[in-house]
Image: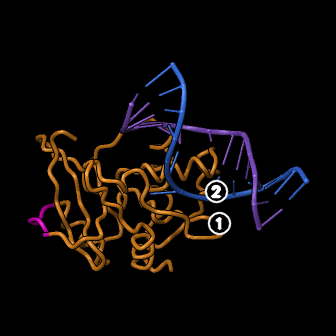
Chain colours: A orange, B blue, C purple
DNA sequence: ATCCTCATTGCAC
DNA sequence: GTGCAATGAGGAT
């Protein structure tokens, strides 16, 4: 986190921020949403994939990423990415069954997902509602202005993009 | 080391 | 209807 570069892609409802390591092999470590229209950065593999996803020309994000593996949360996120592809949705309970855990823990895993879109957590919904969106990383690590986003607006936007709602 | 937070569900009253 | 355990990990202090 101490050495990261931020790329920006704009869309209809705001901006998508892509945090990457600046090491030799550049890896994406975090993806965040902002309700503000920020200035876009130059095109690279990260921004171009996000743009293609947003205009429907690709259905899988597979640029190089880095995240903490070998945890329960990571396993849940990997199962989600593997099994629930574009245009599909799943409930917290069903994903919990697949991962041999409880729905609440699936919610926790989604809330701590550092790589939304790469791990398609917007495709996980509650049994009788859309569930939530924007967890721990909803709050910017920069102390002063807690940049809270309207999470449900983003979840609906993404599900609508994929034709799920 | 302890406490708090965060996207749910189903069963008991 | 409401109440409540179960439960993983990271951040704050």
Q: Which residues are magenta?
A: A39-44
Q: Is residue A30 left or right of residue A47?
A: right
- Residue B11 drawn at (x, y percent): 84, 52
State the SS at label 1. loop
- Residue A142 drawn at (x, y percent): 25, 49
State the SS at label 2. helix
- Work out whether A163 lies above or below A105: below
Q: Chain of mark 1?
A: A
Give the residue displayed 13% in from the left and 69% down from the top: A39
Q: Is residue A40 magenta?
A: yes
- Work out whether A152 lies above or below A148: below
Q: Nearer the viewer, residue A8 or A76?
A: A8
Q: Nearer the viewer, residue A132 or A142?
A: A142
Q: Nearer the viewer, residue A117 or C4?
A: C4
> Residues at badges 2 and 1 in contact (C-beta under 8 Å)?
yes
- Residue A71 drawn at (x, y percent): 46, 36
Which secondary structure class fits the magenta region best?
loop
Give the residue displayed 48% in from the left and 43% down from the top: A73
Q: Which is more N-terminal, label 1 or label 2?
A: 2
Q: Residues within 10 Å of mark 1 (few under 14, many from 20)?
A: few
- Residue A87 drawn at (x, y percent): 46, 73
Q: Is residue A130 left or right of residue A63?
A: right
Disc assigned to residue A106: none
Q: Which residue is mark 2?
A: A93
Give the residue displayed 64% in from the left and 51% down from the top: A97
Q: Chain of mark 2?
A: A
Q: Which residue is mark 1?
A: A127
Separation of residues labelled 2 and 1 (CA atoms): 8 Å
Give the residue displayed 60% in from the left and 64% down from the top: A126
Q: Quadrant of residue A13?
A: bottom left
Q: Quadrant of residue A149?
A: bottom left
């Amino acid at each position: 986190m101490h050495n990261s570069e931020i790329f920006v892609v704009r869309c209809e409802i705001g901006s998508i921020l892509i945090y990457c390591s600046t090491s030799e092999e550049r890896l994406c470590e975090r993806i965040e949403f902002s309700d503000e229209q920020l200035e876009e950065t130059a095109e690279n593999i990260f921004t171009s994939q996000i743009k293609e996803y947003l205009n429907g020309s690709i259905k899988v994000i597979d640029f190089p990423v880095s995240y903490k593996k070998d945890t329960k949360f990571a396993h849940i996120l990997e199962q989600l990415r593997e099994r629930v592809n574009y245009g599909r949705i799943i409930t917290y309970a069903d994903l919990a069954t697949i991962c041999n855990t409880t729905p609440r823990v699936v919610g926790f895993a989604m809330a701590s997902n550092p790589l939304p879109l790469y791990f398609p957590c917007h495709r996980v919904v509650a049994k009788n509602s859309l569930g939530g969106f924007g967890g721990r990383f909803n709050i910017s690590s920069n102390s002063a202005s807690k940049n809270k986003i309207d999470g449900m607006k983003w979840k609906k936007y993404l599900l609508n993009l994929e034709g799920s709602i």
